[in-house]
Image: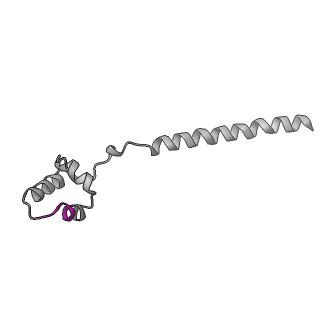
Amino acid sequence: MAKVAKKAAPKAKAKTSKAKVAHKKASVVKSKPASSKRLLSDVKIAKLQKMYKSSKHSAQQLCDEFGISMATLFNYLKVKV
């Protein structure tokens, strides 16, 4: 019976290591840099800049309208506060 137990243990380890490899691959895919996806198109960025320069809209109103954070707004405007 000892031989059967020894043979079963390596199979369990093999499954565990395969699961770890699969998990590592999945975590690599999930960890893309935040800057890889743009929130607004170039057309919307131009509209945002035009609206901001007109001084008719506050920064918060623009954030609400375009669905972006204040930090993202100022990154698009290239304005440092």
Total residue callouts: 0
The answer to which image quadrant residue 44 occupies is bottom left
Closer-to-camera residue (39/52)? 52
Does residue 53 appear left or right of residue 28 in this picture? Answer: left
Does residue 55 appear left or right of residue 34 in this picture? Answer: left
Where residue 56 sits in the image (x, y, percent)? 9, 64
**Residue most toward the front?**
81
Specify start and end residues of the magenta stretch as a single range. 57-62
State the scheme by which the image is colored: one colour
- In this view, 57 is above or below 28: below
Quadrant where the image shows the N terminus? top right
Where residue 80 sits in the image (x, y, percent)? 19, 47
Q: Magenta stretch mostly in which secondary structure?
A: helix
**Residue most toward the right?**
1
The answer to which image quadrant residue 23 occupies is top right
Task: Kindly identify the residue that appears in the image at 22 percent across and 54 percent down.
Answer: 73
Residue 43 highlighted magenta (yes or no): no
- In this view, 53 is above or below 11: below
- In this view, 34 is above or below 55: above
Task: Kindly identify the residue that appears in the image at 58 percent across and 41 percent down.
Answer: 22
Closer-to-camera residue (70/15)? 70
Task: Kindly identify the residue that appears in the image at 64 percent across and 39 percent down.
Answer: 18
Where residue 29 sits in the image (x, y, percent)? 46, 43
Where residue 43 sits in the image (x, y, percent)? 16, 53
